[in-house]
Image (cartoon, rainbow, N blue to C red):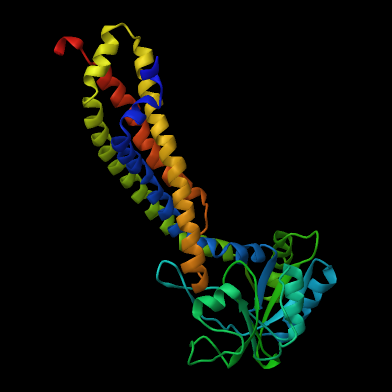
Amino acid sequence: MKPFSAMYFIRENKTRCILLMFMLFLGYVAYLGGLYVTNPRDNWELPIAYYRRMVKVNDIAGDEESFARFLEEVEESGKATVIKNGSYNAFNWNSIMGFENGQSSLTFLSVQDFKTYCDAMGIVCDFENLKSGSMVMSERFAKNIGIGIGDKVDKDFDENILREFTLDATTKEDGYLLYFITDEEDYMLNALLISKEGVTGSEIYEFAHSRKEKYNISIHNDFEKYINDQTEPFNVIYTFIIILLAVIMAVTVNAAFVGMYQRRHFEFAVYRAVGVPKKEIVGKIVKELLCMDGIAVTAGGGIFFLALYLFNQLALYPAGKYLRYFHPLAFFGALLCNLAVVLPLMVTRSRQMLKADICEY
């Protein structure tokens, strides 16, 4: 029976259905919001992956001989590669949310130490021009703050820079990574213990922790927890906003569909009068709603991701920023908004049309 085709009503009422499908498309606002609030945490994925393979230690007693013996023991164990670190140098990058954010910053005491680190982590870099006083950062970081090869930074640039450094190389790392190369004068009894092949970062941590009291060392192994603690509030706020948005969309879209189906009261009254089973009437309504929702999600998705691609390519990438195309939290937000609209619609419109009575006309 042609009127029971899912596309029949949509074809006969194109303008009205397009407007309603546009309202369903607004669920992508929730998706965009999810990409937006998870962006700061996304930028820490690569540094976190690095830190899962290494342990940062320092001598809290200032006993250079004791710390040297500890590092020798690590080397002799064959579990990790030891790389000494200099004093902390750093500056921030500009997040897509409008505030400055920190980064993963390491200071190496020689070009060879930095090369050893890069080899261990799989970082590709041109070492030819590197020397004491060199700075290396990811290409995205350099674009983000607007500096290029040959540019210099010092205390006037940021108070956390201890001496003048020159940007002599960039890496293609997926994030905001920052490295400095200095000399032995800046050595502050800090070291990285990078796990060798076949050894996990947790094994290195346990090895160092078992010698913590003996050598009076401090072990920094809470990097991922620290980042999660800093970014989790964004996820909580987003969840509350999405629940509120889902309720608003459910009420608004439902009101729009009420008017549309009231115009069809006579149509469904006729179906009931000629003996069409309730199951088929409900099925027709469900198929229409799912069809409209499917078109809105599919066509809207194509428009949304094309717009996001162009926004990334033309606006964000040149500024050293970006938005990912997928994140589970963003997907959850969009799905929640969609279900909050479609499921109540199926129930309420079915109940509304099953009450249609030909005797009223």
Across the whole image, how many numbered discs are drawn on residues? Answer: 0
135 and 317: which is toward the camera: 317
Q: Going by the picture, which residue comes out furthest to the left?
A: 360
Q: Going by the picture, which residue comes out furthest to the top?
A: 275
Q: Return the x and y of residue 2 as percentages of the image width and height.
A: 39, 18
Q: Quadrant for the C terminus, please.
A: top left
Image position of 267 with respect to 45: above or below: above
**Going by the image, does 349 lie left or right of 178?**
left
89 and 156: which is toward the camera: 156
Q: Return the x and y of residue 142 as percentages of the image width and height.
A: 56, 78
Q: Return the x and y of residue 30 as percentages of the image width and height.
A: 39, 49
Q: Return the x and y of residue 239 as percentages of the image width and height.
A: 39, 49
Q: Is residue 53 visible?
A: yes
Q: Name the image quarter holding residue 220.
A: bottom right
Q: Is residue 320 visible?
A: no
Image position of 95 with respect to 156: above or below: above
315 and 336: which is toward the camera: 315
Task: Name which residue lies at 77% across and 72% down.
Answer: 119
Q: Name the image quarter holding residue 358.
A: top left
Task: Name which residue lies at 46% across and 46% down.
Answer: 301
Image position of 259 with respect to 233: above or below: above
Task: Name which residue lies at 50% across and 79% down.
Answer: 145
Q: Quadrant for the N terminus, please.
A: top left
